[in-house]
Image (cartoon, grey):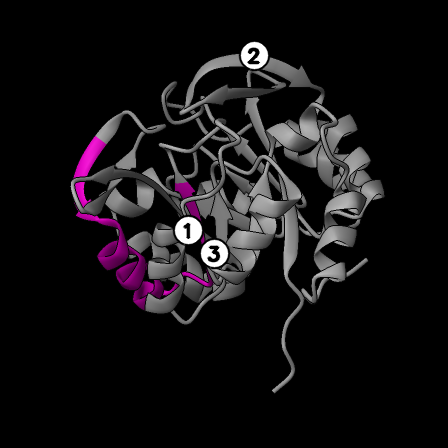
Amino acid sequence: MELLAKRIIPCLDVDNGAVVKGKRFNGLVIAGDPVKLALSYRDQGADEIVLLDISATLQGRSTMVDLVRKVARELDIPFTVGGGIHSLDDARKVLWNGADKVSINTAAVKNPEIITALSDVYGAQSVVVSIDVRRKGRGYEVFIEGGRTATGLDAIEWARKATELGAGELLLTSIDRDGTELGYDIELTLKVSRSVSVPVIASGGGGSPEHIYSVLTKGQADAALAASIFHYNQFSIKKVKEYLRERGVIIRI
């Protein structure tokens, strides 16, 4: 069986039209223009882009379709859009304006049937379920609404259920590690990766090529999502990919 190449995916967290970055979902600072950053990352060799409208759910509105259209007009690599997608109609607007996939989080927890509905209409390959997680004792709990609301759901069990309902991919974020650049939560990533049959994108904590290598190998993630190390030019995507290839990771350069 041919092994699939691992993917490097920059994440653009967008708040009121600007890319922002914080730590553990708080303390946001502006990091740049979403269209310019998306193009820069494309040119550096990003495999995909994830654009998350992080204030949409909290503000009770749908995703910024105009921004999606602007990004889609310029990009020629796959990109996923999340934030404020609560219905089939929300997803339709995003996909029809150029996104390749939609990411749902809060809506999926509150109304799990939406995962199946989206998968039936647009195909599982277009449906990403985003799972935001905090450690709780020896386990992991799912949080929604931008990490503000605990759900009582066990992260590994929810990952399995989301997949069974039709998710084609999981975006797994450790809130505890988010923005810290201390490394991904390998234990969490490995548990989820071993529990599901769909690709897992690891997120939260990427601060170096070593961290990315570790989550792709020890954590068995299919892709690594990162923001801070790319936004602030600590490492280019090209450098990260060269580091991975030198250590035997199958990667597109």
- Which numbered disc, 1 or 3, marks the residue that appears first in the sequence? 3
Determine whether the residue tagged by mark 2 lies in a helix, strand or loop. Answer: strand
Marks 2 and 1, Cα distance to the nearest angstrom?
A: 27 Å
Q: Is residue 12 above or below residue 46?
A: above
Q: Is residue 226 above or below residue 233?
A: below
Q: Quadrant of residue 119?
A: bottom left
Q: Position of residue 23 (x, y in %)?
A: 45, 21
Of 35 and 238, which appears nearest the observer?
A: 238
Residue drawn at point x = 63 percent, y = 38 percent: 208
Q: Judge from the rendering whether residue 220 lies leftward or rightward of residue 231; answer left or right.
A: left
Determine whether the residue tagged by mark 1 lies in a helix, strand or loop. Answer: helix
Q: Judge from the rendering whether residue 47 lies leftward or rightward of residue 192; answer left or right.
A: right
Residue range (magenta): 150-173
Residue drawn at point x = 28 percent, y = 24 percent: 148
Q: Which residue is mark 1?
A: 186
Q: Which residue is mark 2?
A: 29
* Location of the N terminus (image quadrant): bottom right
Marks 1 and 3, Cα distance to the nearest angstrom?
A: 24 Å
- 158 falls in the magenta region: yes
Q: Amino acid at mark 2?
A: Val
Marks 3 and 2, Cα distance to the nearest angstrom?
A: 29 Å
Q: Amino acid at mark 1?
A: Ile
* Location of the C terminus (image quadrant): bottom right
